Amino acid sequence: MITRREVLQGLAFGSLISVFPSLSLARSSLSSKPLVWITLRGAMDGLNVVVPYGDKDYAGLRPNIGLSLAEVNQLDEFFGLHPALQHGYELYKKGQASFIHACATGYRERSHFDGQKVLENGTLDPMAMEGWLNRYLSLSQHNQAIAIDSGIPLIVRGQQGVSSWYPHKLRAKQKQAELLRELFQSDAELGENFDSAMAVDAMASSSSQSKHFNNLMSQAGKFLSTPEGPNVAVLELSGFDTHSGQGSVQGRLASKLRQLDKGLLALQQSLGERWSETIVIAASEFGRTAKENGTKGTDHGTGNALLLFGGALNQSKVTANWPGLSKESLYQERDLAATMDIRSILKGVLIEHMGATQPQVEAVFPDSVDLKPLAGVV
């Protein structure tokens, strides 16, 4: 039995979702354009996702796991897309997918944990515990976010309230809900949070209890397409740490990319007409080594590819100030060098898609005034 004291304790530590897995901690407001963020945890191998088949050194670095021009879906005269992202390629042909290569955060070590923190907090300090997206949300009453997650990920932690939803097996029956509402009625703040939670639960479809990524993406689309719902959704897809058996056309990486691809299709279908206003950002903490290792995998690297999808994109293209894969061009003679900071890309998305101003994006990404926003995303 959950007591009122336990719920209050959960509130005090910001962990109410651990008591009620679908609780919302924020009220809905007027919605702006939809934005979906996906953290690709584990360090996705961008060199085998947006494949630089035109680089003369690529095939020699990856004799077992590399992909040839015949095996990829050609994006331009230099890059091709991994065939597991089939729907992603269809979006590319429609002008609804773009890729930025040879990019990274300002982090240059190779710890997953610290790398993910820097990606999500938008600074150079792994110890900073406020997310860049939460800082953006705090700038406007017209943007509200939901984390499709069993917790609140760092990217949306901070002063601005954020909703959270995740599938659970035990759904509150009407009688149980009424009893809880009666329990909380003497506490205005707790009662308001409970009512907000029930509203989030009501938005979720009755068939939404699967934890498969495509279902989570579908549910995100339902939330974002609800008139009174949020306009920003945050998700994650784990399993990209392919130290061994990475594969090429098939294998561990291909399997994860198929999950991502199915999720994109599910999100698009769920959003309906709202897809035309949406941008999806998929990014990883860092890339992987240019050369395959002895177990036909790759190790922690630096430069990577960032993936953009959505009907709000103005065109499909690959953007890269390509450094090359020759030994002397690699970062520390092992990694794809980063020639663009991810924060420049995110600044561009916030300005062109979400209507942020230059001073606002500088507040979202502190101490980054020298990083100019990437133009032409939307």
Image (cartoon, rainbow, N blue to C red):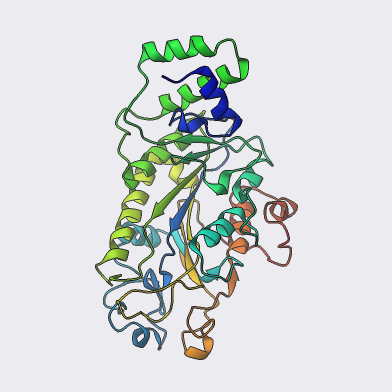
Quarter that holds the C terminus: bottom right
Q: Is residue 252 left or right of residue 185?
A: left
Q: Position of residue 82 (x, y in %)?
A: 33, 68
Relative image position of residue 263 (x, y in whole percent): 35, 49
Observer-nearest of 211 and 114: 114
Towards the viewer: 194 or 36: 194
Query: Nearest the camera: 112 or 234?
Result: 112
Q: Quadrant of the N terminus?
A: top left
Q: Please state if 46 lies on the left or on the right of 196 as rendered.
A: left
Q: Nearer the viewer, residue 129 or 196?
A: 129
Tell me, yes or no, if residue 375 can be seen here: no
x and y percent of residue 244 in the render? 31, 71
> Extreme left residue here?
250
364 over 52 or under it: above or below? above
Specify the quadrant of the image occupied by residue 376.
bottom right
Displayed quadrant of residue 49: bottom left
Instruction: Identify which residue is drawn at 43% across, 50% down.
Output: 236
Residue 32 can be seen, yes or no? yes
Picture residue at 53% right of the left edge, 78% below the top: 337
Would residue 129 appear left or right of 86 to someone viewing this image?
A: right
